[in-house]
Image (cartoon, grey):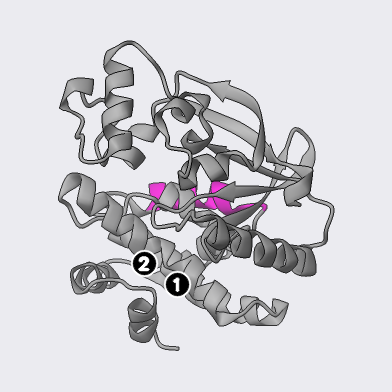
Amino acid sequence: MEHNGFYDLIGLRPGMIQSLRRAENTVDLTALETYLDGLMDPATAGRACAELSERLGDDPDGAKMLLCQLACAHRDRERYAALGISEDVYLATMRCFSRFIHENERRTGRLAFDRGWWTWRQTAMTLFRVGELEFELREYDGEHVLSLHIPSDADLSPDAVDKSLSRGKKLMEGCFGGGRRIMCSSWLLSPALAPLLSEGSNILAFRCRFDIVEWDADRTEFIPWLFDASEDTPFWELPGRTSLQRGVRELLLNGGKVGSARGWLTEQEV
């Protein structure tokens, strides 16, 4: 699979591909092999990403970091195959790059990659998208767990979530061993949302799968995800295109909070 074909398969648009071509004229990947190797190792990926960012210097549209991380993602294809992980999981996982670029453009109007601080998880193969959800291998309070992430384009209908959980757990157990509890930290689990959701809400159905153990009401990262707006947007300027947006906006204007909650997948869901 050549890079051009890979870029197309993961959904990169022509404008970003052009930015990558310009980055190729200034970035010598051969000279950065140590960093690329680091980005593919779970033990070093986070540190390698920070060091690579410093080495790359000025990178206003993130194309230089994207070029490096996509080089790693391209190499990961063989590692997926060696583990017996299917091509559809590989491509779904690596399409995070195009999704993040699209999210940034939608929020800021700029075609840029701003999520390099996160996507070393994909290059190091600690995070995989299986169906609608992403499963991350991580350690929490000294315990090896699976952390669930909810992509912005996920279908949270009960049937789609059931299929993702079933397939994801089997894949992760088959490749990395079983016995891991499944946790999720998200604004979608916030107790503040329950009164704003209808009985048939997919978000409510998803939340009910978890035993909520912690709620940080002061976190504000839900604002970009729910409203496609920056976290510092005045509450009265937040859009109200959906009933949930209107409900949350009113809650915030009246002094309420949403925050983020953490929960464990209940035993009957495992």
Label 2 crowd bin: few (<14), some (14–19), many (20+), radius 10 Å: some
Residue at 82% from the left image edge and 61% from the top image edge: 177
Stretch in magenta: 43-55
Q: Is residue 37 left or right of residue 195?
A: right
Mark 1: amino acid: Ala
Q: Secondary structure at mark 1?
A: helix
Indicate the amino acid at tag 2: Leu
User: Percent x, y for residue 213?
Assistant: 67, 26
Residue ranking furthest to the front: 199
Does residue 39 appear in this view? Answer: no
Any mark on residue 67, and which?
A: 2
Q: Is residue 206 magenta?
A: no
Residue denoted by label 1: 71
- Residue nearest the viewer, comparing 114 with 214: 214
Q: Nearer the viewer, residue 157 or 233?
A: 157
Q: Residue at x 21, y 34 (%)?
A: 240
- Verify CB contact (< 8 Å) between mark 1 and mark 2: yes
Magenta: main secondary structure equals helix
Task: Where is residue 186? Give x, y as percent.
Answer: 51, 37
The quadrant in which residue 250 appears is top left
Indicate whether 167 appears above or below 206.
Answer: below
Q: How many marks?
A: 2
Q: Is residue 96 left or right of residue 235?
A: right
